[in-house]
Image (spheres, rainbow, N blue to C red):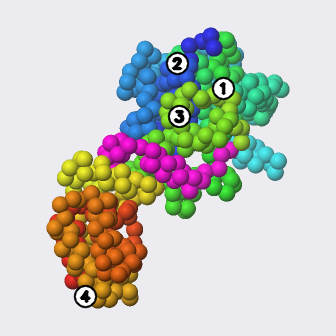
Amino acid sequence: MNKKVRVRFAPSPTGGLHLGGVRTVLFNYLFAKKHGGDFILRIEDTDQTRFVPGAEEYIFQTLEWCGLIPDESPKHGGPYAPYRQSERKDMYRQYAEQLIKAGYAYYAFDTPEELEAMRSDFKTAENPSPQYNQFIREKMRNSLTLGEDEVTRLISEGMPYVIRIKMPAGETVSFTDMIRGEVSFQTDQVDDKVLLKADGMPTYHLAVVVDDYLMKISHAFRGEEWLPSAPVHILLWKYLGWEKDMPEWAHLPLILKPDGNGKLSKRDGDRLGFPVFAMDWTDPKTNEKTIGFRERGFLPEAFVNLLAMLGWNDGTDQEIFTMTELIEKFSMDRVHKGGAKFDYEKAKWYNHEWIKQSTAIDLAPFVQQTFATNNIQITEPSFLHKVIDLVKERCTLLSDFTAQSSFFFQSPTEIDIDAIKPKWDDKKNLFFTELIRAYELSSLWEASDLEKEFKELAAANQLKPGELMLPFRIMLVGGKFGPGVFDIAALIGKTETVARIKHTLGLVG
Ligand code: GLU
C-alpha cells in the first residue's frame, strides 16, 4: 500500500447503533490498525430533519465500550477538523458550483408541487415511481431547460433551488470492490441525485465525496446498502477531478435475520427477544426503550469477537479472537460476499467463552455493575474475586452472576424445602445436627477439610454422602444450583454456614 491508510466510519446520528454499524466500525478499525493507519469518525448530520438528540453521544459511548477509539473525530479533534458535517456546511457549495461550471450538474427550481405532479404525470404501469432522471429532466424547470437569463433572474430573486448531478446517458460505471470484485452500473438506471439542497446543506452524496477527498481517505468501507450509491460517488470523484485520489471501496455484507430472509432489523430483535443495538437506546420522541448487548450482559470483548465472525474468518477453525489477534489476522479479502445470518445462541456462546477465559479481576467491574442494579453489597474485592472464579463457568451473560452468586453475599431469601422434604428423616436430621457441632468445633475451614469431616460424619451415621449433598446445597444456596457445596461453605465462612444449616433444619423439622 503506497498511500497512508486512512479509513472512516461515517454514521448519520439518527438513533441506536445497529450491530451491523458496529461491525462496520470494527472492520474499519482493524484494517487501520493492521496497516498502521488512522481511523476517523465523521458525523454525517447534514439532514437536519433527521436530527436526533443524544444519538451522537451514543455513538461515542458505543465506540468507547467496544474499545474502538477513533484517532480523529469531533471529540478527539484532528488535522482535518471539523469532523461534523453540519460544521463544514460552507465547504460544499463551491464544489457543487464547480460541477455546474463543468457541465456535470445543474440548478433545479422545481417546487415540491411540481415534483409531486411529475411523479403522477409520468407514472405508467412499467414505471410506477418515476424519478428525476435524464429522460424527465428535459420536462422540468432547471438550468438545462431554462435560458441563462431566466436562471440568473430566478437565483437573484431568491427562488429556492437545488443542485442535481447530471447523470450521463448510456455509460457504464465500473469499479473494483475489495470484497465483490468488479461491479458495474448502467448510468441510465440512476436518477439525477440532489447534491446541494435548498437549505444550502449538501446531501450525503456530495458531502461524503468531498469529505473523503479532503480528509485523504484511502479506503471507504461501508454496508452493502450503500452499493447503489456507488456509481454517483464514483462519477463525482471523476467530475471533480479527483479520480486518482479515489479511495478503494469495500461494501460489507448484510447481517441477516436468523432464518436468512432479509436484513436483520431492530424489529426482529423485539420479536425474537434479543438485542440488535450495541447499548440501550431510548427514543427521545417516543420514549421507547430498546435493549442493547451491553445491558443484556455481554462483555465488550465478546461483542467485538462475535461481530468479527459475522462475515469474516481467518481461514482456520479458530473462533475466539482477542482484539490484538484480530488486528494481526484481519484482511478484507477474507470477508464473505454473502450476508451473514445472525444467531443469538451463538452470540451467547461467544460471551460464555469470554466470561470463562477472563480473569476475576477483569470481570469484577462488570459483575459489580450487575450487582449494583440488584442491590447486592460487596464488602471485600478479594471475596468478590473468589466468588467470580467459582461461578464464572456457569454464567453465559454477565447478568447471570446475580442469580449464580447472590447467596455468597446474603442468605438465600427462599429455600426450596419441597426438594428436601420427601426424603427427609430423623437420620438426616441427626446428621445435620451433628454436622453443626462438628463444623462449630472445626479449626480448619478449607473446602477439603469440610468435605472430609462431612464424609466421615456420614460414614459414622451409616449414610451415603450422596443423599446428604442435595439437602446441604439447598441449605446453603436455596436451590439445586451453584458450584461445589464445600467451596461455598468455605467461602461464606463458619458462622454463616452453621446459621444456614440451622435455619433449614427449623423449616424442615
Ligand atoms: N452516512 C452514511 C451512513 O449513515 C455513511 C455511508 C458511507 O460510509 O459512505 O451510514
Front of the two marks 1 and 4 = 4
Name the residue nearer the viewer: 77 or 351: 351
Check residue 342 for magenta coloring.
yes
- The disc labelled 1 sits on which kind of residue? Trp
- The residues bearing labels 3 and 2 have C-alpha atoms spaced at a distance of 14 Å
Q: Which residues are magenta?
A: 339-367
Amino acid residing under circle 3: Leu
Q: Which residue is mark 2?
A: 37
Q: CA distance from mark 4 to mark 2?
A: 71 Å
**N-term mark: 3 or 1:** 3
Q: Are marks 3 and 1 in contact (CB under 8 Å)?
A: no
Q: Does the residue at mark 4 contact the one at mark 2 (Cβ under 8 Å)?
A: no
Are circles 4 and 3 on residues that touch, CB within 8 Å? no
**What residue did someone put label 3 on?**
26
Q: Secondary structure at mark 1?
A: strand
Q: Which residue position holds label 4?
A: 509
On whether ligand 1 comes within 8 Å of the CB at mark 4, the answer is no
How far apart marks 3 and 1 lie (CA) works out to 16 Å
Q: Is residue 334 left or right of residue 458?
A: right
Q: Earlier in the sequence, mark 4 or mark 3?
A: 3
